[in-house]
Image (cartoon, rainbow, N blue to C red):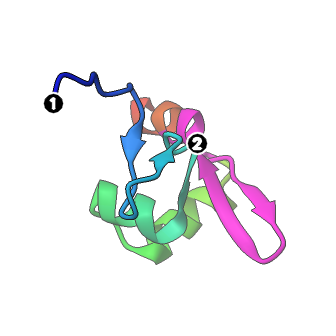
Amino acid sequence: MGRKRHDTTIGRAGEDTQPKLAYTVDELCRACGISRAKLYEEIKAQRLKVKKIGTRTLIPIDEAKAWLKV
């Protein structure tokens, strides 16, 4: 009862999880309210930097924030 919570996020199974470091394309589209096509236009125009890991496209959180400020 008197235990303090850590500053981490608690996962579904009750495990501690780390904060997100990157968005998937779908997550960033939902968060910004834009289409996948528009997001890929921004990537192609090199206004948004991404990281490819295998076939996955990930957008680092700091890149997403910098892109939104433009």
> Which residue bears the numbered disc 1?
1
Find out whether residue 60 is within the magenta segment: yes
Q: Is residue 61 left or right of residue 29?
A: right
Q: Residue at x 51, y 45 (%)?
A: 20
Q: Residue furthest left?
A: 1
Specify the farthest residue to the front.
Answer: 1
Disc 2, SS: loop
Q: Which residues are magenta?
A: 47-64
Q: Nearer the viewer, residue 9 or 67?
A: 9
Tell me residue 5's x, y (percent).
30, 27
What is the tally of numbered marks visible in this picture? 2
Give percent across and percent down for residue 62.
56, 32
State which mark lies toward you, 2 or 1. Answer: 1
Q: Residue at x 53, y 40 (%)?
A: 61
Note whether 33 is above or below 49 in the view shown. Answer: below
Which residue is pictured at 50% across the width and 38% down the height? 67
Residue position marked by numbered label 2 in the rendering: 21
Residue shown at the point (38%, 55%) measured from the top left? 14
Residue 43 shown left or right of residue 26 in the figure: right
| Three-letter amino acid code of the residue under disc 1 | Met
